[in-house]
């Protein structure tokens, strides 16, 4: 079986073929994030289990793969995740087969080994893009399964300092 895993170019030096990376052959819609000196693989749809996963995996600088003790609050795929610092990752939106499109946002604190719930997005979204700027996270476009994947032209802004979400 030939399976391709799309990873950013910065991830390539971390990876060498090894049996512990077999999980990549069975996941779709996961997110890769570089935080500190490690790469984290979050969530995704697990083909073998037939469900979205809450799992967080860490690929360390020595290329070993370990499961992070804390897990996402909800299984999800087609979401966004990016580092806020070397010890924190923001996770937002996505899709879950039980709930459809998600509005849930979470903060993965790698130093404290916990996942904290954040205020929800104004609209549940999947297949969207996001970018941090000036202490805020901007969420653009996207679609919702519940609306027949009708696309949205809204911008949602999450202020990291006040933890307030605004719909523009």
Image (tube, rainbow, N blue to C red):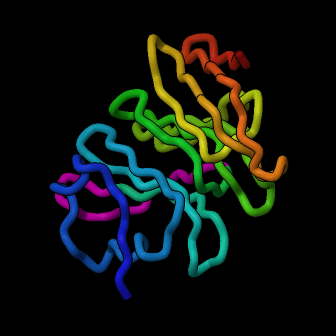
Q: Residue at x 60, y 56 (%)?
A: 77
Classified by dominant secondary structure, the portion drawn in magenta counts as loop
Q: Is residue 153 something one can see in this rendering?
A: yes
For residue 96: magenta? no
| Nearest to the observer: residue 145 or residue 59 | 145
Seen in the picture, residue 77 relative to 26 is either above or below; the reply is above
Asked where in the image residue 143 lies, by quadrant, the reply is top right
Magenta segment, which residues? Answer: 59-73
Q: Is residue 85 left or right of residue 101?
A: left
Q: Position of residue 14 (x, y in %)?
A: 20, 56
Q: Residue at x 25, y 64 (%)?
A: 64
Q: Quadrant of the C terminus?
A: top right
| Nearest to the observer: residue 153 or residue 7 | 153
Asked where in the image residue 48 lies, by quadrant, the reply is bottom right
Q: Residue at x 33, y 39 (%)?
A: 35
Q: Position of residue 82 (x, y in %)?
A: 44, 37
Q: Residue at x 59, y 40 (%)?
A: 128
Q: Quadrant of the N terminus?
A: bottom left
For residue 62: magenta? yes
Seen in the picture, residue 134 relative to 13 is either above or below; the reply is above
């Amino acid at each position: 079986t030939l399976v391709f895993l799309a990873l950013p170019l910065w991830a390539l030096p971390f990876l060498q073929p090894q049996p512990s990376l077999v999980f990549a052959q069975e996941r779709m819609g996961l997110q890769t994030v570089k935080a500190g000196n490690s790469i984290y693989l979050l969530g995704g749809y697990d083909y073998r289990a037939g469900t979205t996963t809450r799992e967080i995996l860490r690929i360390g600088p020595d290329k070993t793969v370990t499961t992070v003790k804390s897990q996402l609050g909800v299984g999800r795929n087609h979401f966004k995740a990016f580092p806020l610092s070397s010890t924190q990752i923001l996770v937002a939106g996505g899709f879950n087969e039980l709930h459809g499109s998600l509005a849930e946002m979470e903060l993965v604190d790698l130093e404290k080994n916990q996942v904290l719930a954040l205020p929800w997005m104004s609209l549940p979204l999947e297949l969207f893009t996001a970018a941090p700027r000036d202490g805020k996270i901007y969420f653009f476009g996207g679609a919702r399964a519940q609306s027949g994947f009708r696309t949205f032209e809204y911008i949602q802004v999450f202020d990291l300092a006040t933890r307030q979400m605004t719909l523009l």
